[in-house]
Image: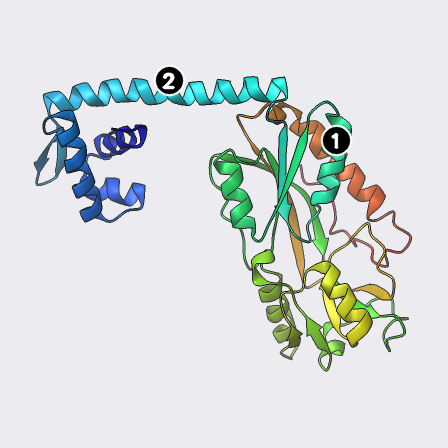
Amino acid sequence: MELRHLHVVLTVAEAGSISRAASSLKIAQAGLTAQLRRIERGFGGPLFVRRSDGVEPTELGRHVVQRSRDLVERFDDLLATARKIAAESGSLGIRLGGVAGSLTPLLVGVVRDLLPDQPQTTHIERSCDAVLELVRTGKLDVALVVEFPQSPLRIPEEVAHRPVVTEPMLVGIPAGHRLSTRTEIRLSELADEDWAVPEENYGGGKLNLHLACEAAGFTPRCVHFGADPAAAAELVRSAQTVACFFPTPQNLPGVVLKPIAGNPIHRRVTLTWQREHVAAQHVDDIHAALLEAYQEQVWGNPHQRATPTGLAAAAS
């Protein structure tokens, strides 16, 4: 008998129905029924009476439910307090995360400056859903995720979050390109170009690029796939390719970044955190410092050829 079995019993008791409990636990009803039978054998007797309109706890079931609820609550409290003590003592440190191509390096620098005595680890994941799951399960403490209007994220209820900035997508073109002297570029002017596009897991950028190009009257000719920002920059320099980028504090020699007229593609950067970690009490400072660092290092970069045009702003 394990703690997870007590969670099953409590879910069935609260749902009052095997089918509703199976839906809540996201398992098949037949699988839950078989699991519940094994749990009942472990306790020595039936925990629920099956009725036409659901289930009702037996006398043994009421005893198990009451004691299980107490045990689960105490275990959750033990986990939360242990994590807090461990974090405060510095044994766990602060675990940061994000997806490739996001502002995670800025987050790392900000947290290092704010909490210099806390050791840090950083985890770069392939998708925002993976990042959110790590935050939800307590394996990451603070992380950045990005989302596009056409592919919004489903942030779990257990994950606290706060928007940071909304960024326009920029087009990276080779230095000396026919459009390199333009202040901004119309998407339709790139209809005949070869594109380097990111892996779709990077938050939906590829999908949103396709939708915006189709709205502009063409389908982008994507020939390089799965390109992270560093690989995309090299392809632009060496293969006469265009690629999508977002504002960056880094210089990209040989690549000119241009805004797209009308800002048809943009993404929102969101700060997420583990509610139970000691870092949660520093979220206001982290958020403010992250926004300040973004404004100084990204829009303050003299090589950054784009301006936010009202899109990049603090979201309170």
Q: Secondary structure at mark 1?
A: helix
Q: Quadrant of residue 55?
A: top left
Whichever of callouts 2 and 1 sits on the residue coming sooner in the sequence is 2
In this rendering, is residue 304 above or below 95? below
For the N terminus, give its image quadrant.
top left
- 167 relative position to 127: left or right: right
The three-letter code of the residue at mark 1 reads Arg
Return the x and y of residue 111 as percentages of the image width and height.
Answer: 72, 32
Q: Is residue 104 visible?
A: yes
Q: Nearer the viewer, residue 260 or 25?
A: 25
Q: Which residue is mark 1?
A: 112
Q: Residue at x 20, y 44 (%)?
A: 19
- 26 relative position to 239: left or right: left
The three-letter code of the residue at mark 2 reads Arg
Q: Residue at x 20, y 39 (%)?
A: 35
Q: Is residue 245 visible?
A: no
In this rendering, is residue 39 above or below 196? above
Farthest bottom residue?
Answer: 192
**Disc 2 packing (10 Å; few <14; some 14–19; many ≥20):** few
Q: Are marks 2 and 1 in contact (CB under 8 Å)?
A: no
Return the x and y of residue 82 as percentages of the image width and height.
Answer: 50, 19
Q: Which residue is mark 2?
A: 74
In this rendering, is residue 62 above or below 39? above
Measure the alpha-carbon separation of dots 2 and 1.
Answer: 34 Å
